[in-house]
Image (cartoon, helix red, strand yellow):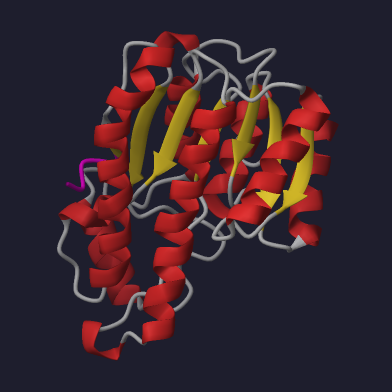
């Protein structure tokens, strides 16, 4: 099996000997990030929200390509489940170097139609899940570690229907800005990557062709992004070459905003 859009020559050098945890890594951008970190030599925990089949497929693909991976189920909105996952990682591999906060729920609809349950779900996963990950990283991540949180370029676009989703992403961007100072004493970098519209297996679902065309037109290149283009930047930030990059929000969006 071939890893989708694996960019083994991505900048930043080898991650050999490092252990990475990628939340929401069974599908979409998270899946490709897991592949890329493994291609760079990291041992990768493929987190999934109790959906074992797609996660097992990602692990099998990574292992078939010569990498090392482990699927662990955890609802990241639960501190107990996230903590158990971190414990399983440390039990398996003995160290934790890289956290990629990727898992998110995106419900986009007119603000007046968003239900309280939808609001709570997005904040539980997108904000509280990152909060749990950051606190556990402070407790367990090795010195000189790396924290990368996936936000969204939509926080700068003022798109109708994105109010609550972008509120969650704005919150985690502020985590990055402040926590880079707090984590700095241990030489742990904390950064955000904000993709533009990216062509994943589910991205087109529920979106009109007119809306998708408008997103493509916003890019300087007239197209959607590719997951591998996001993963390459994450791999760079996870590497030793990015040791002087912290507190940044890197917009990987083809010039959208």
Q: Position of residue 125 (x, y in %)?
A: 48, 61
- Please tell me which residue is depicted at 27% across the width and 28% down the height of the picture: 247
Count the labels in the image. 0
Quarter of the image for the N terminus: give it: top right
Image position, residue 27 (x, y; %): 62, 55
Quarter of the image holding residue 168? bottom left
Residue 63 horizontal/vertical position (percent): 83, 33
Query: Which span of residues is magenta-colored?
Result: 252-257
Identify the residue at image location x=54%, y=60%: 77
Q: Is residue 250 visible?
A: no
Pick whichever, 184 or 17, lies toward us. Answer: 184
Left or right: 232 with respect to 25? left
Residue 254 belongs to magenta span: yes
Q: Is residue 233 depicted above or below 225 in this figure?
A: above
Relative image position of residue 152 (x, y in whole percent): 32, 51
Along the horizontal axis of the image, is 136 left or right of 45?
A: left
Q: Is residue 33 magenta?
A: no
Q: Is residue 75 above or below residue 176?
A: below
Q: Quarter-wise, where is residue 250 in the image? A: top left
User: Going 33% across and 67% down the picture, which residue do you hit?
Assistant: 212
Nearest to the observer: residue 49 or residue 64: 49
Left or right of residue 80, residue 216 in this image: left
Residue at 31% of width from left, 54% of height from top?
Answer: 169
- Observer-nearest residue: 89 or 62? 89
Helix, strand or loop: magenta stretch? loop
Q: Is residue 165 visible?
A: yes
Q: Closer to the camera, 177 or 55?
A: 177
């Amino acid at each position: 099996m071939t890893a989708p859009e694996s960019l083994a020559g991505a900048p930043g050098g080898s991650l050999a000997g490092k252990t990475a945890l990628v939340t929401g890594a069974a599908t979409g951008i998270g899946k490709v990030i897991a592949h890329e970190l493994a291609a760079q030599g990291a041992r990768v925990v493929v987190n999934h929200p109790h959906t074992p089949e797609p996660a097992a497929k990602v692990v099998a693909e990574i292992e078939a390509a010569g990498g090392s991976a482990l699927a662990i189920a955890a609802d990241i909105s639960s501190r107990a489940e996230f903590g158990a996952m971190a414990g399983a990682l440390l039990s398996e591999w003995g160290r934790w170097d890289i956290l990629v906060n990727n898992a998110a729920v995106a419900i986009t609809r007119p603000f007046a139609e968003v239900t309280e349950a939808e609001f709570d779900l997005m904040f539980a996963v997108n904000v509280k899940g990152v909060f749990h990950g950051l606190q556990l990283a402070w407790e367990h991540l090795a010195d000189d570690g790396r924290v990368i949180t996936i936000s969204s370029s939509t926080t700068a676009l003022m798109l109708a229907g994105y109010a609550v989703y972008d509120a969650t992403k704005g919150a985690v961007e502020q985590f990055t800005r402040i926590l880079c100072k707090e984590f700095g004493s241990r030489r742990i970098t904390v950064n955000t990557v904000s993709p533009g519209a990216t062509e994943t297996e589910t991205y087109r679902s529920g979106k009109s062709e007119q809306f998708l065309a408008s997103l493509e037109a916003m890019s300087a290149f007239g197209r959607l992004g590719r997951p591998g283009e996001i993963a390459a930047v994450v791999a760079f930030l996870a590497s030793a070459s990015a040791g002087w990059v912290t507190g940044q929000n890197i917009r990987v969006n083809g010039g959208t905003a």
